[in-house]
Amino acid sequence: MSTLTATKPRAIATPAEKKRRTKRKMLTLNIVSVVGGIALWWVLSASGFSLPTPPQVVERAGQLMADGTLFTDLAASLTRVLIGFALGTLLAIPVGFLMGWYAVARGIMEPWIQFFRTIPPLAIIPLVMVLMGIGEQPKIFVIFLAAFLSCVISTYQGVVNVDKTLINAARVLGSKDAGIFARVVIPASTPFILVGMRVGLGAAWATVVAAELIAAQDGLGYRMQQAQLYYDLPTIFVNLIVIGILGLLMDRILLFTETKLTSWQERR
Amino acid sequence: MSTLTATKPRAIATPAEKKRRTKRKMLTLNIVSVVGGIALWWVLSASGFSLPTPPQVVERAGQLMADGTLFTDLAASLTRVLIGFALGTLLAIPVGFLMGWYAVARGIMEPWIQFFRTIPPLAIIPLVMVLMGIGEQPKIFVIFLAAFLSCVISTYQGVVNVDKTLINAARVLGSKDAGIFARVVIPASTPFILVGMRVGLGAAWATVVAAELIAAQDGLGYRMQQAQLYYDLPTIFVNLIVIGILGLLMDRILLFTETKLTSWQERR
Amino acid sequence: MSTMTSTLANPKISIQGVSKVYPLGNTEFKALDNVSLDVGDNEFITVVGPSGCGKSTMMNILAGLETVSGGQALVDGVAVDGPGPERGVIFQQYALFPWLTVRDNVEFGLKTAKMPKAERRRIADHFIELVGLEQFADALPKMLSGGMRQRCAIARAYAVNPSILLMDEPFGALDALTRVNLQEQLRETWSKEQRTVVFITHDVDEAVFLANRVIVMAARPGRIHEIIEVDLPAIRTEEMRLSPEFTALRNRVWNAVYHQTSGENSVSEPSATTA
Amino acid sequence: MSTMTSTLANPKISIQGVSKVYPLGNTEFKALDNVSLDVGDNEFITVVGPSGCGKSTMMNILAGLETVSGGQALVDGVAVDGPGPERGVIFQQYALFPWLTVRDNVEFGLKTAKMPKAERRRIADHFIELVGLEQFADALPKMLSGGMRQRCAIARAYAVNPSILLMDEPFGALDALTRVNLQEQLRETWSKEQRTVVFITHDVDEAVFLANRVIVMAARPGRIHEIIEVDLPAIRTEEMRLSPEFTALRNRVWNAVYHQTSGENSVSEPSATTA
Amino acid sequence: DGAAKDKVTFGYIADFNGASVHAVAQELNLWEKYGLDADTPVFTNGPLQIQALGTEDLDFGYIGPGAMWMPAKGDAKVVSVNATGNGDRVIAQAGINSIEDLKGKKVAVAEGTSGDMILNLALKKAGMSLDDVDKVAMDPGTIVAAMASKQIDAAGLWYPLISTVEKQVPDLEILSSNEDFENEVAFASGFVGANKFVEENPETTKKVLQVVREALDYRAENLDETIELTAKLMKLDVDTVKVDASNVTYYTAEELDQKIADGTVDSWLTGMNDYFVSADKVTDPESPKEYFTSDLFVGAGK
Ligand SMILES: Nc1ncnc2c1ncn2[C@@H]1O[C@H](COP(=O)(O)OP(=O)(O)OP(=O)(O)O)[C@@H](O)[C@H]1O
Ligand SMILES: Nc1ncnc2c1ncn2[C@@H]1O[C@H](COP(=O)(O)OP(=O)(O)OP(=O)(O)O)[C@@H](O)[C@H]1O
Ligand SMILES: [Mg+2]
Ligand SMILES: [Mg+2]
């Protein structure tokens, strides 16, 4: 909001300084919020809800780290998520474009995309197994699908929302459809595409548990399911938290990318 | 694309006529696409993949309709999804606004929203049950959460992307934060909010299976899980298809709403 | 050039040593450098100057939409802290709400002020007629031509009846006749309703015709170059445009803009503002 | 008024009975009604007329960005079917790519034409200098003032060196000096490089100074009201603006715009186009 | 010899019953000993493995008693019995003392599990059926949370999950256990093979069964060591696995040969079939003679 109100003359700071200050404040708030959340969890677990306490979870995390399990799992899940997510968004962008641009493509693809978006990933596992077996392929595919379906809608909407005058300007400067796509539609719909990528990333992580139902040998989701067999709550919590933190980190990277990529926008 | 190229002088149609023609063409394409998809499925199931064939699924659907199961399940799931989705998006809009507008709110809420977005709904079911019991409440809550988390990111991004000059124009005309929110930010970010709602709707339906793990007596997701135990693929397919169709219909309604609400945009 | 330092007894607007610095790549760009200016109550000033000399920046600071990097801007003796409906603004880029019809755009500010519906409608229709958009009252901005959008923005700002009007090239996209009509209209309303007006324009004729004082700005860094008093009778008529006094003033302003720009890089040019 | 019906032997642009109807609420709005006009190769025409009379609409039809509702628009004898780089356009709303710097905006069309990098750069820098944006070559549009944005759009259109230039109020946001400079520049380039120019403006001086013919349009419905031949020497100089011939033409155009508008609703006014 | 080793894929579930044979086989290098190159993917449940068998991605797998109706339906062959479980219970909150008391109460069950089986059997024995109680379907983890937070009154569940519940609800009532049905039905788990694979690769199947037999023997004779090996394989602590192993009867291969010869195994499987029929899981099951390849099992021991 700082740009919208004139400050008193003494409160003068260079723009760079101001930015740094805002960033620091933000980080503080983040930390306060996280600490508050952990405190709430501690209170809940102490007051009789059958939850493991933070120290229990930390202890379990220590064990899982000591024997290397956590790192193997992390590497396995991260690889799957990264590949699935990358493929998903990479496909979503041209597909979203085709749908936004060509009525024929939209007419053919939209019903299916809408249809599959509502289908829970759990439900398509048998089908995926039939088609792809039990190796890495089907796991990555399930994650890919989740990321793709979340991202494609957003990209499509982005394409539809591109300012018509900019497209006209490009046409007038000699661009054909391919050029307009690469040089106008993609940059102009970057905000939408990045929303799609962020939502897709969330979906990819949220799907990792389902994906690792398909005969996984390791992975954070697999470990959680195994822990569920013994109702080993501390392990479940460790893996949940690791997934959450990884998701958060990757989201931050996307957000950072976005800030760089859309700095041309006049934003609040 | 029709608005972008000048047609030959004889190809003259009133705008309304043109619109109707496009709509008809679209519907035809949709139908062609769906029929094509069903044909592909039929070929796949006939050529040895262990899938039920369309007639088997239709037969099963007939049985499920005859004994009323399908309708009870449909009513149960639809109620849950509608309530959860409505609550989720209703909360997501003000929360997304708060996050986009007030740095403090963003600092406090963002880590948690990002965190929970990556957590699979399956994993929070025990927790939700402990807190809310086994009635309708926890099921709706899980759906609500999925819809909320998908939608809030989009709304937030929409708020951040609102053209600064429009906000300035409103301020200059005397609007305060609340007025700007209701009269500028919401209409200006409608395209983003509607993407969020569409993604949220998909998430709500995709979560219905997980939600109905919580001691459901009926519902499409519950029926699917039961069918999975018996490896009863036709029943799974019937329910999947019903979920898909319902999702598609609801999405169409949103899309229609969007077209009405954002007709002020100059769009392709 | 001493006129500009003469501070008024009770200025409506007082700009005191205002600077504005923008980051530009790795360096900084001085959009405004130590600008000082007092505008009296019920004064009509016009601002002219080369493109990019900081006119819009100055106006945005007065509107409360832009912060200062140094100095201060006062309105009624109080430091500007955010925008307010007593300061009406017409933006260089129109800034119409694309989802509202012309009428709803014009009613926007009145709705904020919680005016009853019937009255709102009456006032809006009055100003829509004033700018000649009756036929398009229910049209969306995307259906309007450039000049019609600008007229809608004018009607919207007039409707809230602000005591200060800040107008950024408001008539730039209008045809000659509409422009002349609106100029006369504005002058007339101003003389009746005791408003303070800050009016940015590139049209030297317009600047002279409307103003009590013409502020001529210079670029790099943005600063006030000269202030020219317009000692024409308070009531301006079309015939006056042809008078020798008018022509003389017009030429004086023209030269002030012209000369300064050609001497843009001459360091000997004295800064127009008081430190 | 018979001049306008005289069809040229080999017109570069030929508008033949073009109409354009927009839906407006439940009715229709005639933005252009049976407009016919031929523009010769290497002709410079300017278009003036009241706000909303269809100038931009006509230009968009020529650019291939808008379809006709009746009649046809030919360029080089071929019906217009979509835009092309041989027809350069400067939009009323600038339409800069906000994510590209000034230089990248100017290079956009050259990149499309697959010009080598070094040459692209050279040409872009030339036109950036021409419009006086050297210092802002690496700035994003959001950092530019209104006039600077407009100049960037001008440089971008010039850079692709189109054989037809369609310009919609291109100098509207510029200060007097920059404007005069760019007017002279445009005239000079035009006489050297044999381009066809259609130039929309509200400034009657500008219309006369630049044109071989001034097209005066009328509103409701949008149509051609009068075409005024400008029989000044091909090479226009600053001094010429003060000549009695110039003043006479200026007044004639002014009256054409002025009179028509006041008589807007008089049915007796003959339609300017041939059916 | 120098011949190439036979490749097999043999799935398992990561609990003691499902993983102990694999742990032993790996630790004692039994695969290599019998000339096999084994890939042992881990699954979370039986039905998923049956599906994988059907798509030829898997040659062998392990299923618990709850999924035994799937081979009975012809989806796979049972190549060996693993063990019979005694860890299933009908549990209830304090104050509910008998199965009859469950009338109208909220009773949770994870459908298709041995918990489902024991609840059904217990109700039937008391002259009741699922219609007499307020049945709520949940997955096993959720049942633990639901019992612990007293959201439900009773459940069909098994150890070691029950021990988690006991920690939260010390006065938990046990209303029924496997022993109550000793003579009617056994809760037998087993190893399954893909129909096609077993038919086309009798030699490899034999080698696999030799590994299984030797591992069964080792487990029955060295239970403590087996628990440790299994805990290591599954990265769990020994105590947890011990609880898991404490409610199961383990047999040596020879004991199983014996029980096959005297028809005991056949009666276990028939008993389970009857149960599955009564619970509507299958309508017309094959007879154990068709889907349990006992001759292969016995043959591998010769
Ligand atoms: N956000 C920004 N970042 C960097 N520079 C900026 C920014 N906004 C404005 N400027 C610079 O400040 C200077 C003054 O801009 P301003 O818009 O006030 O000019 P102006 O006098 O209104 O010009 P015009 O007549 O062309 O509208 C310009 O040189 C411009 O490049
Ligand atoms: N999309 C549209 N829907 C409805 N009416 C439109 C649309 N676009 C333009 N018009 C109408 O067509 C008429 C001509 O518009 P145009 O933009 O060509 O005017 P113009 O002569 O360029 O005016 P200006 O000088 O104000 O730019 C206007 O009355 C406008 O309201
Ligand atoms: Mg400006
Ligand atoms: Mg126009």
Image (spheres, coloured by chain):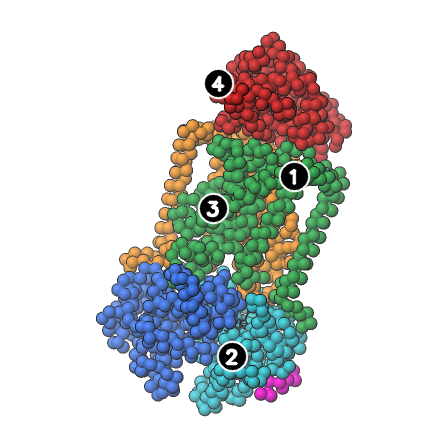
Chain colours: A green, B orange, C cyan, D blue, E red
Q: Are marks 4 and 3 on the same chain?
A: no
The quadrant holding residue D236 is bottom left
Residue at image mark 1 = A70
Residue found 54% across the figure and 20% down from its top: E1
User: Percent x, y for residue B34?
Assistant: 41, 39
Dot 2 surroundings within 10 Å: few (below 14), some, or many (20 or more)? Answer: many
Given the image, on which type of amino acid does mark 2 rest?
Gly
Residue at image mark 2 = C49
Which chain is disc 3 placed on? Answer: A
Q: For residue C87, which numbered disc appears in the image?
A: none
- The quadrant of the rendering that contains the N terminus of chain D is bottom left
Membership of C71 in magenta stretch = no
The part of the chain drawn in magenta is C1-13
Dot 1 surroundings within 10 Å: few (below 14), some, or many (20 or more)? Answer: many
Given the image, on which type of amino acid does mark 4 rest?
Glu
Given the image, on which type of amino acid does mark 3 rest?
Leu
Which of label 4 and label 2 is nearer to you? 4
Q: Is mark 3 within 8 Å of ligand 2?
A: no
Residue found 42% across the figure and 34% down from its top: B41
Which chain is disc 4 placed on? Answer: E
Q: Is mark 2 within 8 Å of ligand 1?
A: yes
Which chain is disc 1 placed on? Answer: A
Give the residue at the far bottom of this rendering.
C244
Residue at image mark 4 = E199
Query: Is disc 3 placed on a helix, strand or loop?
Result: helix
- Cβ–Cβ under 8 Å for marks 1 and 3: no
